[in-house]
Amino acid sequence: MPSPCLGGADMSGGSKTSQWIVPPGDPYEGDLTSAFGPGGTFDVEIEITEKGDGLDCAEVACSVVTRADHRAAGNRTQDVRIPVAFAGQEPGEPGGGEGVDVPAGTASYRSAAEFTTAGKPLDLLLHPDSKKLYAGADNLPDTADVDERGLHVLNPEDGTSESWISPAPGSTGALRASAAARIAGPLPGDGVVYNYPLRGVGSAKSGDEAASGVWLTGSTITDIAPGTTPDTVLVAQGATLSEIERATGTATRTLTLPGGTQFAADAERGAVWYTDFTAGKLYRVDLASFTVTGSFDLPGGPGGMAGFTETDPATGAVWVGVDRSVLVFDAAGTLVKTLVGKDLARDAAFDTATGRAYVVWQDGGDLSDPANDNNGTLTVYGTEDFAPSAKDLSLPGNHSQAGAASLAVAPGGATVFVTSPAEGKITRLVRQVSPLVTHAPEDLTAEEGEEVALTAEAEGAPEPTVRWQVSTDGAQTWQDVEGATEPALTFTARTAQDGYRYRAEFRNDVGTTRTAAATLTVTPATGGDSGGDTPGDTGGTGDASNGAGGTGGDGSTGGDGGTQSSGGSTTDGSGSTGTTTGDPGSTGTTGGSTGAGGDSTAAAGGSTGTAGSSGSAVGGGVAGGTGTAAMSGGGSLAATGTTVMSVTLAAAALVGTGVLVHRRARRRTEDAL
């Protein structure tokens, strides 16, 4: 169903972003609504802009549409789309196709595997070079006969363990089993730098028997990140921020803030963002001078539940999770967006390839609280407009009673890993996308007997299948073309198919998307003499569209008395069969009577139409008068696929109809996938 956008539905009569149309005498007729005119016509104005509400008509195709609304919302037969363009644009084409069950190009995630090979997972990193999945873990009691603490290296496809590094140097330098609490970042080629309790800074790679590391003086490490050089690391020990040498543990620089425990480093812009949830403050630290250069208030005031602090590498924006909200500050410290969820904001990760942010929300886990249901959520946002980029995914059983969830995102966002400490598992999620049309069939004209080809292409995940459909009655009804399951549909054009419409329907596990319909126009064959020496051609016995084939001569060049028959049926009525007869030695003549349109509903005008001698009738005139068709193929102008729409929009049998601006998904593959 088309949906309102660029201002939404006008509910007061003041914005004129849409108009409501009702039958004359309707009880709702008045200031907010206009009544139908003769034949179901109406003449209204709407006011729209090129860009707004996260929609830019320079990037996606926009249309003015009509639709049956409140009292007949399930009736889709009256949907009409008229592409519109703004100054400097070409008229919008049907990019993306029309989603049947979900909008074309709808992205979502599904669980593909669950890994239980890393104890109680606390943090994740997908190594950019080796592509191995590193999981920092603690022991999960009563689930194994061994202490599972340490750094686990997993195959990201199936979760099998490739390596497990547990021993790390303690306060005396002696090796001991140690949990891996936080992963700071990757080492070149393979391996990671991480923090192990209470004050350990270690490094290890797949295959190592033990981690190398140093034990710091001072209080417990509360956060860690890469330093300004490959040999250093930034460490938070409560409100104290230090840059230390990994080999010796010596602090080269130290800064004490008024409060806080958590930070995020933006090496590209030389900044560290430090969060004090207790005081409700966010501090900016300049990495060059190692001084505080900004202080900002966290909305909601002091005492918010600590979630996360992360920076977007592409934009420098700072994302702060507090309670059930994510606060987004730009690189200058200005609050630009507040995202609200139903669960606790626990971690965020960014994919710079697609410009998307991934946020995991955890349930509180206390089922005595009506706000809790024991299920977490994964959400995906665009980092420019903060609009949802995928359907929310429920994470059953992911609650915060045993620790905060963490995320890792593969470049491009095709795979996401989410931890659930309480369940002792890592869930591997894969993206799936409903079909997005990248090439739609176009209208074409062919001569009788000419080979024609229609092509369509779409992308999606999983890869979609295709089937072709044909309408013989001006897109009122559709049927599958038997055996047509390839991107190209080829067949021989026959006059009986004049005015037929064809579309491709793409399907995968996520949804179904249809291309815009293409209209086939078939003209009589040219050439040949009109004498009686040329026998009539043999008519076809059927074609890809299930239309009626002719037999005998076509009468166009005379012949030996052959007869061609074509289907003359009409919508809700019946017409007699027209025949074409050629006598030897003379020019063929066209016979057959006109099929009556019965009581069919006009496609646009609301009146009964009559059809010509062959083909299908699809209603009458646009403005409500009786439509006629005198050519083979029959039907009104609507039956040929030509849309008639001027300032006045016409509609038939609409009850409570609105004129809306409709956003049609037209995203490039790299954006949608």
Image (cartoon, rainbow, N blue to C red):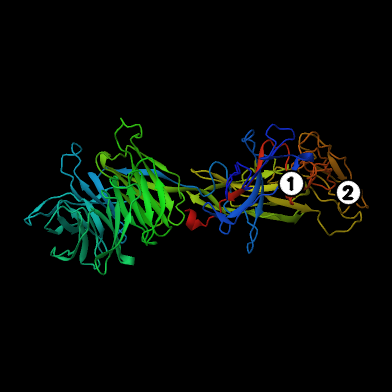
Gap between marks 1 and 2, in whole Å?
Answer: 56 Å
Residue 541 falls in which quadrant of the image? top right
The reply to whether dot 1 and dot 2 touch (C-beta < 8 Å) is no
Callout 2: SS: loop
Q: Residue furthest top?
A: 368
- Total labels: the figure holds 2
Residue 70 falls in which quadrant of the image? top right
Left or right of 539, for residue 581:
right
Residue 501 coordinates in the image, percent (x, y): 70, 47
Residue 521 coordinates in the image, percent (x, y): 75, 52
Callout 1: SS: loop
CA neighbours of label 1 inside 10 A, class few (<14), some (14 to 19), many (20+): some
Residue 534 falls in which quadrant of the image? bottom right
Select label 1 or label 2 by which is in front: 1
Q: Is residue 271 above or below residue 508?
A: below
* Image quarter of the N terminus: top right
Residue behind mark 1: 43
Q: Amino acid at mark 2?
A: Asp
| Residue occupying image coordinates x 65% and y 53% | 83
Residue 400 coordinates in the image, percent (x, y): 28, 40
Residue sitting nearer the eye, 356 or 635? 356
Residue 560: mark in rendering: 2
